[in-house]
Image (spheres, rainbow, N blue to C red):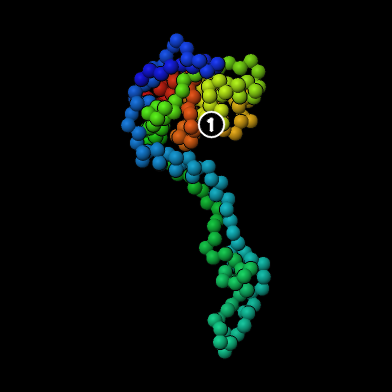
Amino acid sequence: MKVKIYDTTGSATSKSATLSEEVFGIEPNNHAIYLDVKQHLANRRQGTHKSKERAEISGSTRKIKKQKGTGGARAGSIKSGTRVGGGRIFGPRPRNYHFKLNIKLKRLARKSAFSFKAQNDGLMVLEDLAFANAKTKDFVNLMNSLQLTNQKVLLILGDQNDSVYLASRNLGKVKVVTADTVNTFDVLNAKKVVLTSSSIVRLEEILN
């Protein structure tokens, strides 16, 4: 699969990039995508939720009224979960939401995500970036040139580039990652995935 390579002015260059069919041209596996995204979102959860149960509420344990003869239901401690101000019944407790997936399945999910984007015109290839200074203005100008203003954009670099990362981190709809840290959720969450020339080689090395 051949795609055009764009420069920083938004113009198509005379060069083209060849995308591997094994990474960018497979039939997307929806269940693998579902599991990988589910794991990513679960692993992001802190799991620090907590509510007080009746044993943790401050208050008297005195029996509120006598057991019989009142005409109403029997009542014990004021800390009961059925009373206002009482503890919560079966409330949330701290827990770990993390779970494991096999590496082969996670690779299949990423391949499926990239293939889905390729089939739906969600991929763009950009020549390697080299910002002299980490200026947000320069990155905004780049997005304007590529006609990606106000769109969710995922920019994938071949290697760590601090100037590009620093120039983009104040933009809420732009995320910059390297080829070895990209995940399925970020690929699918972006309206347009922008690959640099060096990132294609690195992605194919990792996913094949």
Q: Residues within 10 Å of mark 1 (few under 14, many from 20)?
A: some
Pick the quarter of the image with the N terminus.
Answer: top left
Image quarter of residue 149: top right
In the rendering, at what x and y percent does residue 202 appear?
A: 45, 21
Amino acid residing under circle 1: Gln
Q: Is residue 107 visible?
A: no
Q: Secondary structure at mark 1?
A: loop
- Quick one: which residue is furthest to the bottom in this view? 69
In the rendering, at what x and y percent does residue 76 appear?
A: 59, 77
Pick the quarter of the image with the C terminus.
Answer: top left
Left or right for 207, reference 72: left
For the point 38% across and 17% down, the residue is 2
In the rendering, at what x and y percent does residue 184 appear?
A: 45, 34
Image quarter of residue 93: bottom right
For the point 41% across and 18% down, the residue is 3
47, above or below 188, in the image: below
Image quarter of residue 112: top left
- Quick one: which residue is furthest to the left in this view? 27
In the rendering, at what x and y percent does residue 182 appear?
A: 48, 30
Q: Is residue 13 visible?
A: yes
Residue ID for mark 1: 151
For the point 60% across and 62% down, the residue is 52
For the point 64% across and 15% down, the residue is 132
